[in-house]
Amino acid sequence: MRMFARDDIMAALDEQDAMAAVERAIVAFAQGKAQSGDAGHFSFPAPGDAHVKVAHLAGEEIFALKVSASFYANPAKGLSSSQGFSAVISATTGEALALFADGGWLTDVRTAMAGAIAARAIGYSGGTLGIVGAGIQARMQAGMIRRHVGADRVLIWGRDLAKARALADEVGGEAVADLADLVRASDLVVTTTPSTEPLVEDGWVRPGTRIVAVGSDGGGKRELDPRILGRATVVVDSVAKCLENGEAGWAARAGLLAPEAIIPLGDLLADPHAFAADAIVVADLTGLPAQDAAIAGAVWRVLASS
C-alpha cells in the first residue's frame, strides 16, 4: 500500500476534473448506482465529532473508506479543526492500494464542491454571496463558488467578528456584524457552522433567496429556522440522510415539510429545471460517501500513474 501526504494529494488534485467526478457521483447516487454503507457518526466532549463513510460507484475500479473528524478547539492548540484520512481499495482484488493522509482536506474540498454544484443547480448564477461562518469550510465555499459559479460581492458573518474580518480580507469580501443584514442582502446564503441551534431566522429570508446548508450533518446540528424550509422548495443530496441528520429533518419533524415534496439533487442535476425568480430554494447537504469515493478516485488516478 502506498502512502501519500497532504502536499502530494493537493498537487495531484485537478479541481475541474474532481468537481465533475463529484457531480457524477451525486447523480449516480440518486440513480441507485452507488453502494454506500451506513455512515458512522461519533460525538466527543472535546468538543468534536467524526464520520466514517465507505462507498463504491458502479463501474469504478476502486472503492474508498473515509474517516473525517472536526475538533473545534484544535485551532487553540495550533492544529486544524479538520482531521482524517482516506483509504483507496481495489474493487477487483480487495487490495489496499493507498492511504491518503490528507488531514481531512479532501472532505473539506468535496464539501465545498458539492456546495458550488448545488448553488448552480438551484438557480444561483452570481450576485451577492453571504457566508455564515468564518472557519475552513466558510473559506472553501467562498472560493469554490466564486471560481465556479460567480459572485459579485462576498459577505462574511461569524460569531467572532475578528475572525470574520480576517476571512473577509483573505477572500476579498466584507465582514458583517449583524447576521440578519447578511441574509437580507444575499442572493445566495451558504451556512457552514456546527451550530446546534438555528442561526438564520425565517423573517430575514426574502423571496428569491437561495440557500445552501452544509453544517447540519449529524449530532443535533441545525442552522436554519425550520419555517424557512416550510415555505421553500427543498433539494437534498440524500433524502434519507437529510431527514435523519439535516435541516430537512427538523422541518419534517415539525410538520412543516412533506418528505414526498423533497427533490433529490442528483435528479435535479440529471434533469435541470429553473425555479421561479421569487422562489426560496434550500439545498440541504449532509455529504455523500459517494462523493468521497469520487474525489479519492480522481486523485488516485493521477497518483497511480506517477
Image: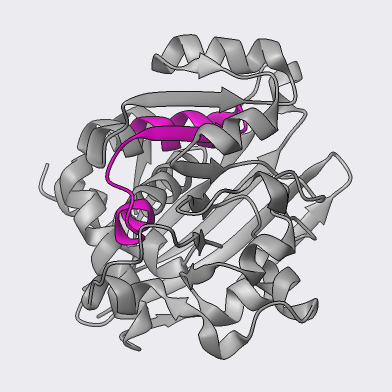
What residue lies at 61% left-to-right and 19% top-to-bottom?
A: 176
Residue placed farthest to the left in the image? 305
The spot of residue 4 in percent (x, y) is: 35, 39
Q: Can residue 90 be seen in this view?
A: no
Q: Nearer the viewer, residue 18 or 4?
A: 18
Instruction: Tell me where the magenta segment starts and ends, as one range.
Output: 117-143
The spot of residue 45 in percent (x, y) is: 89, 45
Colouring scheme, one of rainbow, by chain, secondary structure, one colour? one colour
Q: Which of 153 and 116 is in front in this view?
A: 153
What residue lies at 43% left-to-right and 34% top-to-bottom?
A: 129
What residue lies at 71% left-to-right and 49% top-to-bottom?
A: 203
Residue 133 within the magenta-colored segment of the rendering:
yes
The spot of residue 188 in percent (x, y) is: 45, 43
- Place residue 270 in its image quadrant: bottom left
Position above or below: 133 against 229? above
Query: Which quadrant holds the N terminus?
Result: bottom left
- Place residue 63 in its image quadrant: bottom left
What residue lies at 56% left-to-right and 62% top-to-bottom?
A: 286
Q: Nearer the viewer, residue 59 or 194?
A: 194
Q: Can residue 158 be seen in this view?
A: yes
Position above or below: 254 against 199? below
The spot of residue 288 in percent (x, y) is: 47, 67
Position above or below: 39 against 193? below
